[in-house]
Image (spheres, rainbow, N blue to C red):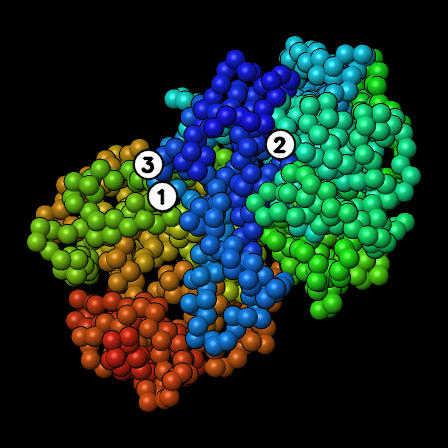
């Protein structure tokens, strides 16, 4: 297809480099410098998508980040698919493949559009909630169709082939936006020697100057832009970042920037290059020079392809050499939009009329239009557009003084393009991200940034200063304010002279009336992407939604990928009128990060695969591999699960490992246990505050078990902590909870008790830990050390320094199996050596390696809990039958003390941990099974607890289980029943959770 809308000259495109691309399986051509949107318009493509609710045909409306309709699916292969890319921001590259994100069988002829036409009146705001409630049984059917209809684009079904990056940066000043205000601010700050980052979302700097025909110092404004950019590039203290959207502004001047590094080259990055980079910037000061978006007016059928922003039409003409039609009707409330009619006329196309809603517009631009013979219709508005897949004509009618009603007869004008301008909305989004609320400015007819606690200045159109001269001046002023705050000398630069003419006052008009009431008039769209209409907003207000936040959520206004950049102010004004209040009283919705969508790839960077979830291996991993260990993942560690011999099933291996440990000696690689070194003069007191039990009198060389609870009193981790010195302790945690516990300790130290002198260091990786357990474990230990490890010299819950196999070691006499047990800790590099030295005595003692599953069985036989399995965030120590682990008499309270004393936590019928013995000893209860007292109770049965741990015990020759039962500690010997999904009901007796050696004699020998 020829580029029928392309001008023979003009624009910033390179006509010597034609590019071909594919849209909806058809091939088109454009030029280097085009965006996908400008190339589509050049080729006369009108329909680029369908609306969300009514599936109405939609065309390109804008030319930048505010575009609501032209969101494309891009990618030539499955692996390079990227959904919802704005055509207005996607630069054209050779071989680009794209398509519309919705429409069936195609975007030009969408059958869902018939539903919108026929049933549109039956789909007001909230119709989902009102329509799909009955019958209740049909909801899943409704849901499948609603989900199928919802959404834009699709995710790829193959792995992303590209590389993404993240970068941390610091600067004195981050200037956001490289229009006239941003460029002048950056130049001043750079000349003063400040470290400057200048970021702009466009592919080149210049902002609005790239799309206008104005002059600076008598030359095209783009020449001034080029000279400033060239000068900035010579400063070593300046980083220039085009194609970089500052998408988030967070507390303490922390901002995130999404840089599209190679999206303009191909759908995948060249070898060795990253596709996108996510910058995390800490700036001492920020200058927001983010400009403003033009507001289209709200009028009947304003979504028909061919309806556009006035400024967007000028952008396509002046920057891309594309006139998106043949005949133009311009509707405006201000002088600035007259530039569009002049641009259109001077491009050789016909301006059918300028429809100015003001009664007596005047000024140089108005006169320039009249001097060209353009028909200027004052005090009027375009009340309705005619056409389906493209504008064919408009209805124009006179309006009263404030534009609230039609006052005369309607005139029809033939045209294929309608450009409208209702003024400008300052881009305040980033200024609101940290909680600052924008304030209404009557002069600017828009919200401008409010007060903020951030180190931030604003300049240009974001402040409602829409002139180039004013923007340049504010840029210099804001930069010098930054320099003053930084203690640097102020800098003055010569600003260029502008050729701007004085403009008459704009009219505050947001919703153009129709001859019919809003509810009966043709649809007047406020939010194009979500099909939010003026009638829908009025209905929401009539139904009682008075907060603009509630109106937003009820109607979905501002929910789309454009986040209401075009429609929000119009929607707020319509709501304000319905509520009989002012726009500032109505307020604005909250703007949150991200300003525009950011890919998951950019957010993740290289933190994916093994770099996101790295596999951690113990020092003995190679030995485990040789022995054929099966593994389970615990806190990123590859832990041996069990060690099957040839021909053994998992249960066979577990039985063998359990029996060997109880009868002789077993060995467990326990290196993965979290280990935190705690030092400082307040270390002992700190432990007393984070553990439920007392630590004040723990002597050097002793160990103690402790529980940790959240503020609600619920257990979240446990472990043994040993006293290495008066002010020195070693805390162990669960393998999966180590990182969380360390973070939790740091949190309380830094926020609650910063006055305490205590330091935490993770030493998990520093030590290799091997636990030998069983009646022959002392004899095995004696084979490798000369140290006296007799019971008299080395008692239970003691630790000693000694040499094991020639290696200095810390040995702890603690037990998680209930057997005589020693936990040997050596520097990690020597772990495999000591492990192998122990196995030199394998045959003599039948030394048997066991994994985590055997460890679980052995501890369950003893009634020892596993945090995270026998606890789930809803049980406190007393529920676990562990009052001995809680000291209520400590001088200073501990975390969770008040929480576990709440009324609900002391109920006698709380679920309590008990042992469970099935009546049939051969039945192993499934973990998670729900218990009931009456197996014949009608459904839904009242459930009284659940099974948390359940195993077959080879040592006891029966199943053992632990679980929670309401009032369980007072129900010993009673029966509880567990209905299973296969229809069986298993009977069990409530008993003590300690099934083996209830006096603990085996671990004290």
How far apart are labels 3 and 2 at the CA level? Answer: 70 Å
Q: Quadrant of residue 167?
A: top right
Label 3, on which residue?
828
Label 2, on which residue?
324
Q: Secondary structure at mark 3?
A: helix
How far apart are labels 3 and 1 at the CA level? Answer: 42 Å
- Circle 2: is it few (<14), some (14-19), or many (20+) Cα within 10 Å? many
Q: Closer to the camera, 998 or 450?
A: 450
Label 1, on which residue?
157
Q: Closer to the camera, 234 or 843?
A: 234
Which dot marks residue 530? none
Q: In the displayed structure, does residue 731 sit left or right of residue 309?
A: left
Q: Residue at x 78, y 16 (%)?
A: 215
Decide if residue 570 is in sight here. no
Mark 2 or mark 3, which is nearer the start of the sequence?
2
Q: Position of residue 639 (x, y in %)?
A: 29, 47
Q: Position of residue 274 (x, y in %)?
A: 45, 26
């Amino acid at each position: 297809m020829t580029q029928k809308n392309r001008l023979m000259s003009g624009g910033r495109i390179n006509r010597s480099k034609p590019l071909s691309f594919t849209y909806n399986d058809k091939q088109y051509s454009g030029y280097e410098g085009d965006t996908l949107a400008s190339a589509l318009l050049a080729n006369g493509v009108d329909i680029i998508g369908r609306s969300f609710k009514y599936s109405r045909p939609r065309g390109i409306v804008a030319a930048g980040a505010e575009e609501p309709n032209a969101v494309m699916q891009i990618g030539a292969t499955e692996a390079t698919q990227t959904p919802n890319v704005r055509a207005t921001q996607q630069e054209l590259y050779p071989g680009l493949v794209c398509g519309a994100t919705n429409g069936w069988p195609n975007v030009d002829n969408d059958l869902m559009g018939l539903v919108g036409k026929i049933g549109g009146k039956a789909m007001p705001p909230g119709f989902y909630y009102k329509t799909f409630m009955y019958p209740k049984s049909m909801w899943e059917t409704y849901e499948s169709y609603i989900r199928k209809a919802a959404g834009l684009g699709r995710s790829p079904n193959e792995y992303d082939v590209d590389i993404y990056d993240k970068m941390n940066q610091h600067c004195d000043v981050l200037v956001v936006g490289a229009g006239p205000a941003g460029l002048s601010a950056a130049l001043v700050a750079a000349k003063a020697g400040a470290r400057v980052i200048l970021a702009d979302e466009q592919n080149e700097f210049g902002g609005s100057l790239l799309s206008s025909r104005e002059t600076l110092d008598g030359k095209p404004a783009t020449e001034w832009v080029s000279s400033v950019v060239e000068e900035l590039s010579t400063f070593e203290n300046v980083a220039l970042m085009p194609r970089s959207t500052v998408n988030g502004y967070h507390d303490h001047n922390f901002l995130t920037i999404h840089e599209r590094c190679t999206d303009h080259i191909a759908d995948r990055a060249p070898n060795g290059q990253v596709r996108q980079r996510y910058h995390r910037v800490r700036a001492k000061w920020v200058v927001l020079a983010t400009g403003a978006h033009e507001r289209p007016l709200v009028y009947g059928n304003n979504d028909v392809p061919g309806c556009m922003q006035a400024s967007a039409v000028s952008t396509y003409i002046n920057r891309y050499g594309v006139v998106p039609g043949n005949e133009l009707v311009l509707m405006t409330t201000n002088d600035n939009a007259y530039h569009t009619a002049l641009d259109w006329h001077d491009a050789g196309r016909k301006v059918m009329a300028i429809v100015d809603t003001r009664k007596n517009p005047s000024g140089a631009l108005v006169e320039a239009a009249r001097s060209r013979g353009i028909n200027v219709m004052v005090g009027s508005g375009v009340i309705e557009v005619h056409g389906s897949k493209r504008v064919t004509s408009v209805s124009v009618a006179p309006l009263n003084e404030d534009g609230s009603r039609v006052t005369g007869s309607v005139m029809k004008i033939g045209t294929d393009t309608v450009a409208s301008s209702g003024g400008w909305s300052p881009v305040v989004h980033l200024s609101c991200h940290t909680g600052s609320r924008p304030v209404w400015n009557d002069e600017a007819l828009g919200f401008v940034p409010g007060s903020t606690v951030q180190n931030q200045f604003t300049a240009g159109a974001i402040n409602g200063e829409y002139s180039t001269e004013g923007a340049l001046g504010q840029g210099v002023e804001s930069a010098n304010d930054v320099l003053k705050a930084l203690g640097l000398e102020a800098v003055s630069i010569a600003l260029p002279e502008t050729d701007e003419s004085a403009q008459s006052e704009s009219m505050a008009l947001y919703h153009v009336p129709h001859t019919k009431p809003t509810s009966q008039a043709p649809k007047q769209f406020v939010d194009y992407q979500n099909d939010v209409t003026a009638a829908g907003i009025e209905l929401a207000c009539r139904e009682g939604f008075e907060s603009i936040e509630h109106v937003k959520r009820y109607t979905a206004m501002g929910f789309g990928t454009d986040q209401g950049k075009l429609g929000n102010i119009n929607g707020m004004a319509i709501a304000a009128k319905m509520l009989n209040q002012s726009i500032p009283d109505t307020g604005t919705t909250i703007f949150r990060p991200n300003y525009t969508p950011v890919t998951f790839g950019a957010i993740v960077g290289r933190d994916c695969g093994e770099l996101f979830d790295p596999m951690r291996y113990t020092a003995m991993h190679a030995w485990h591999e040789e022995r054929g260990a099966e593994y389970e993942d615990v806190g990123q560690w590859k832990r041996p699960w069990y060690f099957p011999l040839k021909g053994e099933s998992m249960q066979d291996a577990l039985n063998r490992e359990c029996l060997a440990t109880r009868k002789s000696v077993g060995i467990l690689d326990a290196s993965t246990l979290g280990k935190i070194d705690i030092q400082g003069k307040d270390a002992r007191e700190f432990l007393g505050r984070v553990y439920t039990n007392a630590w004040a009198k723990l002597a050097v060389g002793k160990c103690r078990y402790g529980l940790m609870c959240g503020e609600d009193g619920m257990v979240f981790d446990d472990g043994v902590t040993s006293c290495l010195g008066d002010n020195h302790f070693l805390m162990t945690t669960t393998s999966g909870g180590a990182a969380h516990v360390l973070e939790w300790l740091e949190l309380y130290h830094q926020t609650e008790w910063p006055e305490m002198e205590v330091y935490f260091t993770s030493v998990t990786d520093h030590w290799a830990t091997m636990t030998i357990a069983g009646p022959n474990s002392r004899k095995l230990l004696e084979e490798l050390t000369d140290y006296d490890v007799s019971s008299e010299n080395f008692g239970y819950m003691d630790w000693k320094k000694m040499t094991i196999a020639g290696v200095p070691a810390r040995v702890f006499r603690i037990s998680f199996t209930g057997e005589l047990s020693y936990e040997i800790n050596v520097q990690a590099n020597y772990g495999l050596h000591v492990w192998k030295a122990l196995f030199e005595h394998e045959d003599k003692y039948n030394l048997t390696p066991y994994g985590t599953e055997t460890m679980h069985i052995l501890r369950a036989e003893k009634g020892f809990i596993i945090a995270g399995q026998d606890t789930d965030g809803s049980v406190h120590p007393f529920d676990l039958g562990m009052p001995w682990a809680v000291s209520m008499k400590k001088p200073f309270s501990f975390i969770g003390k008040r929480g576990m004393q709440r009324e609900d936590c002391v109920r006698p019928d709380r679920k309590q941990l008990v042992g469970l013995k099935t009546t049939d000893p051969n039945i192993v209860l499934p973990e998670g099974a729900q218990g009931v007292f009456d197996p014949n109770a009608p459904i839904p049965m009242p459930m009284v607890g659940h099974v948390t741990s359940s195993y077959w015990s080879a040592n006891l020759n029966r199943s053992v289980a632990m679980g929670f039962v309401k009032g369980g500690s007072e129900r010993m010997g009673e029966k509880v029943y567990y209905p299973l999904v296969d229809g069986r009901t298993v009977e069990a007796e409530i008993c003590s959770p300690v099934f083996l050696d209830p006096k603990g004699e085996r671990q004290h020998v």
